[in-house]
Amino acid sequence: MDKLTIVKVGGKIVEEEDSLNQLINDFKSISGPKILVHGGGRSATAMAARLGVETQMVEGRRITDQSMLEVVTMVYGGLVNKRIVAKLQSKGCNAAGFTGADLSIITSVKRPVKEVDYGFVGDVIDVNTSELRMLIGEGVAPVIAPLTHDGKGQLLNTNADTMATELAIDLAKFYAVSLVFCFEKDGVLLNPDDERSVIRDLDKDLYLQYKSKGIISEGMIPKLDNAFKAFNSGVNMVLITNAKNLTKPSAVGTMIRR
Amino acid sequence: MDKLTIVKVGGKIVEEEDSLNQLINDFKSISGPKILVHGGGRSATAMAARLGVETQMVEGRRITDQSMLEVVTMVYGGLVNKRIVAKLQSKGCNAAGFTGADLSIITSVKRPVKEVDYGFVGDVIDVNTSELRMLIGEGVAPVIAPLTHDGKGQLLNTNADTMATELAIDLAKFYAVSLVFCFEKDGVLLNPDDERSVIRDLDKDLYLQYKSKGIISEGMIPKLDNAFKAFNSGVNMVLITNAKNLTKPSAVGTMIRR
């Protein structure tokens, strides 16, 4: 099986000029097939504020009403995605930007209303990578924005970590997939105040132990749940690390282990 | 040679719910390979106003400073493009949205400053349809937003008629291309106040004659210049018609003739 690297980067990295340029350089120098999945939450919040659209978050998740859906469609699918694509192209990396609606890559269902009405937020139900694999085979690097569709014409806001995970699981049927979650820390920290306290290796038992003791912070839990889901569904390697470590992924960060 | 239909639709059609839905239905029922190129000027102007960004036009062309570039990148590449894609997907048409930066489909150069500084506006210098043709061969319908890049990381605002024309000329090397410019009139009118005064057939001599007599309105001239350029560069059929006539293109509209 050929190797395929999927890099997920959070909003903060792609929204600041310096860290974005660094990321572009690092991403393009990854050898072999690769996909970039990006966020853009901070830009969406800033654009929403300029438009007088109120941002409401519940447990780190954005409530997406019609106005906010318009904002995230513009910001994720347009502004952030196309900036990354143009920059990658300038480095000789043949990037193509997509949302989950394009080529019907990711179909989702509007999240059912329970205690919280998240609005136009989609939970992934189907992944289609057939055209994506053809493009990857031609040397194209897909750049994926965190939006999906319901197959009935409705765009939905979808978590970028989840999209990267679902793509990795589907593509693991065809490639030896490495999934790298990048953020602004060197990995999952034992002590949030100590940047050097990176947990180097994390297996499920240790994760559950840390989680029950409250050692792993709330914000990391969805990311780690995704990481373990990917690892237990055929993805070869799952690493959580600093975007700065992208070109040396085996050297540092939190590696998911069996 | 296989047949390929390129449909260019103006902003007004894709920005109003009813005409957009009609267009989606008509476009998906075109048989064989097809590409949709869209505008979005009215939405961009409206979004710019909401953001306090002033819209300045010179001879129907948008002056695109940094703030306006942000707006058109969001609106054309995100909002308008992804809405069309999601709607086409819901009709079983495997659409994928692109700008000229994606797959480096269209490279342009920032328009030199002469009497007017148009800002971040791009004049097309190169067209690459290699991956696009592969996707078309797989039944994908590309949906193209009017943005290009300069190959150095800069996105540029580019006229949608021009993009449709340049795509048609390049693709004419591989397909028998029909290029259909859709707008809200039935064709080029002899008398702008009489909707029935459609010029059915227009050759270059007649065009120059009408132009010199001021019969053809200012706004139609760039469109017709594009139409003749395409027709004289290998495109099989060039038609200017009402979006409503899309499924009966040979029946009505202004047909460019030799």
Image (tube, coloured by chain):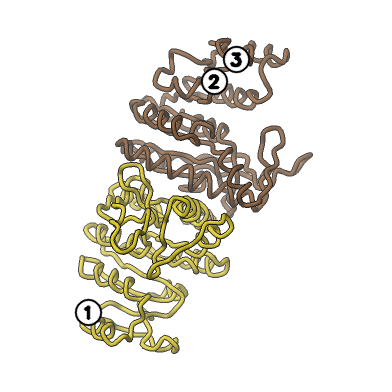
Chain colours: A yellow, B brown
Mark 3 secondary-structure assignment: loop
Which residue is disc 3 drawn over? Answer: B189
Label 3 Cα neighbours within 10 Å, binned few <14 / some 14-19 / many ≥20: many
Q: How far separated are the C-alphas under marks 2 and 3?
A: 8 Å
Which quadrant holds the C terminus of chain A? bottom left
* Local SS, label 2: loop
Residue at the location (69% across, 38% down)? B57
Tag nearer the camera, 1 or 2: 2
Where does residue B117 sit, x and y in percent of width and height?
74, 44
Q: CA distance from mark 1 to mark 3?
A: 71 Å
Give residue B226's position: percent from left, percent from top.
Answer: 59, 27
Instruction: Find residue B146 and report its horizontal and vertical position in percent.
Output: 54, 40
Instruction: Using the image as rendered, state which of residue A190 and residue B207 is in the foreground.
Output: A190
Residue A96 showing in the rendered view? no
Identified at 43% across, 18% down, the residue is B249
Q: Residue furthest front?
A: A115
SS class of the residue under badge 1? Answer: helix
Label 2: which residue?
B185
Q: Amino acid at mark 1?
A: Lys
Instruction: Give the residue furthest to the right.
Output: B115
Query: Which residue, given by chain and number where applicable, does mark 1 sit on?
Result: A204
Q: Chain of mark 2?
A: B
Q: Chain of mark 3?
A: B
Pointer 2 and pointer 3: residues touching (CB < 8 Å)?
yes
**Discs 1 and 3 lie in a common subunit:** no
State whether residue B184 is above or below residue A169. above
